[in-house]
Amino acid sequence: MAQLTLDRWNITFGGDAPLAVIAGINVIEDLDLALTTGRALKAICADLGLPYVFKASYDKANRSSLKSFRGPGVKKGLEILAEVKSQLDVPICTDIHTPEECEPVAAVADLVQIPAFLCRQTDLVVAAARATQAAGGLLHVKKGQFLAPWDSKNILDKIKEATGGAEMTLMCERGVSFGYNNLIVDMLGIAEMQKLGAPVTIDATHAVQLPGADPRTGGASTGGRRDGVSVIAKSAVAAGADGVFLEFHPDPDKALCDPLSCLPLDGARALLTTLKAVRDAVRA
């Protein structure tokens, strides 16, 4: 099975490595929230023996409405992520949106993430691959809601062609569109993507989204089913996922982005403990 390593952090994804945890907040609201969340999650993962990568977005470029909170932007956002990295001594995952962002982001982020809606944007994928390779990081590509698992081969091929054959990509399952305002996750797709030679994570947070179906805003924002996050995460780990992608908040209902999908921070230890037990049971 495919394995990838962040050498600087001695973190391995895939194969017989421990379940990787990519977790944090949806979007940067301020430095204090990022540090509070990252510090708590790092401690939990250390106790459980799980490798940890802090995740936060500096810009949510695909919000439903112009009125939606997007974050501090690339300059201020990267400054905050660099501070989190320095203070907590953790690797960073964040997402990019344009080719121009790739080099500055790769200089800070160890795991450069390509959003699902942008996974087939060739210029972005190529620029991200080259910048991330030069910086010594890895790519985390979310499979689009419009793609079959095996269609990920084309994404992986683009990255290899752009980097001289480098193996540097984790694929992320986050559900596929199912009619209107709904997503489903086919757990069989995890193994299908692993067959392509990439470790595979599950984005259980965004898999419970109800796109354009937030009743509080009349469809001007995305709804969600928070209770389903743990169900999807446990199912995916049982199906062989190499890592989990989760978003938390000390007070989810007050989160400035996707509040109906993120989990309460005080529930992180229980969930991650269960996911580790599921992983251990599957491997046994």
Image (spheres, rainbow, N blue to C red):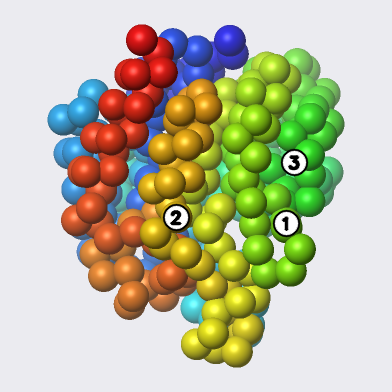
Secondary structure under badge 3?
Answer: helix
Going by the numbered disc 3, the residue's amino acid type is Val
Q: Nearer the viewer, residue 136 or 37?
A: 37
Q: Which residue sits at x=24%, y=64%?
A: 250
- What whole-number distance in Å separates the C-alpha atoms at marks 2 and 3? 31 Å
Above or below, 11 against 37 in this view is above
Residue 222 location, x and y as percent?
A: 57, 73
Going by the numbered disc 2, the residue's amino acid type is Gly
Q: Which residue sits at x=57%, y=29%?
A: 200
Pointer 1: what residue? 177
Secondary structure under badge 2?
Answer: helix
Secondary structure under badge 1?
Answer: strand
* Label 2 or label 3, whichever comes before in sequence order: 3
In the visual, does 51 lie left or right of 118? Answer: left
| Quadrant the C terminus occupies | top left
Mark in the foreground, 2 or 3? 2
Pointer 3: what residue? 125
Is residue 110 in view from this perspective? Answer: no
Pointer 2: what residue? 228
Circle 2/circle 3 CB separation < 8 Å: no
* Label 3 or label 1, whichever comes before in sequence order: 3
Going by the numbered disc 1, the residue's amino acid type is Ser
Residue 35 location, x and y as percent?
A: 24, 55
